[in-house]
Amino acid sequence: MANDASLGSRLAKPVLHLLCLLPLTYIVWAALSESLGTDPVKALLLMTGEWSIRLLLVTLAVTPLRQWLNMPKLIRFRRLLGLYAWFYASLHFLVVLTYLFGWDWDIALEELSERPYIIVGFLAWLFMLPLGVTSNTKAIRALGRNWKKVHKLIYLVAVLAWVHVFWQVRSSYFDAVLYGALILLLFYPRLKKVYETR
């Protein structure tokens, strides 16, 4: 039984890597097979953006889940999940720069004036940047106690990501409401803890 538990522990991260890469595999396959529909750019934006916020929410869920399920070892997956959230957010940003702006800053300024939600999305990605670059052992040691302070930016990122989604809704608000409800649910234990310590 001990050997089985040890094997499961060793396989957990590789399996998680594979699961996190499945959306990318599908996106690449859909692009190469021309299966992205009549508006491939919109499909790429939607898929990369959705997987970024989904993985961001899963990252936020790690801490409350380890407490609710009494599984402290779950914490070792949080950094990995956060990096994949940043990875998909970066892909999303790259699609915007390449296909929406064409790396032309005049077009970018025009698009930003017409679609201000892009600015909010960019801010979310920008605040993810220090989280991504400090998600390594060397940075954790160098920052010491300040590392946790830096990584509290994830709460701001989650709010900005939700505003980015909500602001561009044109028909169904289902996803925006669902993401908002999940963020509130995940923030509740943290807000409660802050309130109780006052």
Image (cartoon, grey):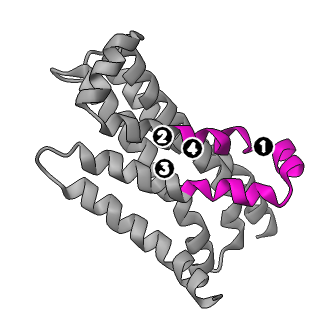
In 3D space, how far apart are the residues under numbered discs 4 and 1 (Cα atoms)? 17 Å
Q: Report the residue at 66% width, 41% height from top.
A: 130
Magenta segment: 126-154
Q: Is residue 32 visible?
A: no
Q: Report the residue at 78% width, 60% height from top.
A: 6
Residue denoted by label 3: 55
* Most frequent secondary structure within the magenta stretch: helix
Sequence-wise, the earlier of marks 3 and 1 is 3
How many residues crowd around disc 2 within 10 Å: few (fewer than 14), some, or many (20 or more)? Answer: some
In 3D space, how far apart are the residues under numbered discs 1 and 2 (Cα atoms)? 22 Å
- Which three-letter amino acid code belongs to the residue tagged 1? Asn
Residue denoted by label 2: 123
- Which three-letter amino acid code belongs to the residue tagged 2? Leu
Sequence-wise, the earlier of marks 1 and 2 is 2
Please determine whether, in this image, residue 68 is positioned above or below residue 152.
Answer: below
Residue denoted by label 4: 127
Sequence-wise, the earlier of marks 4 and 1 is 4
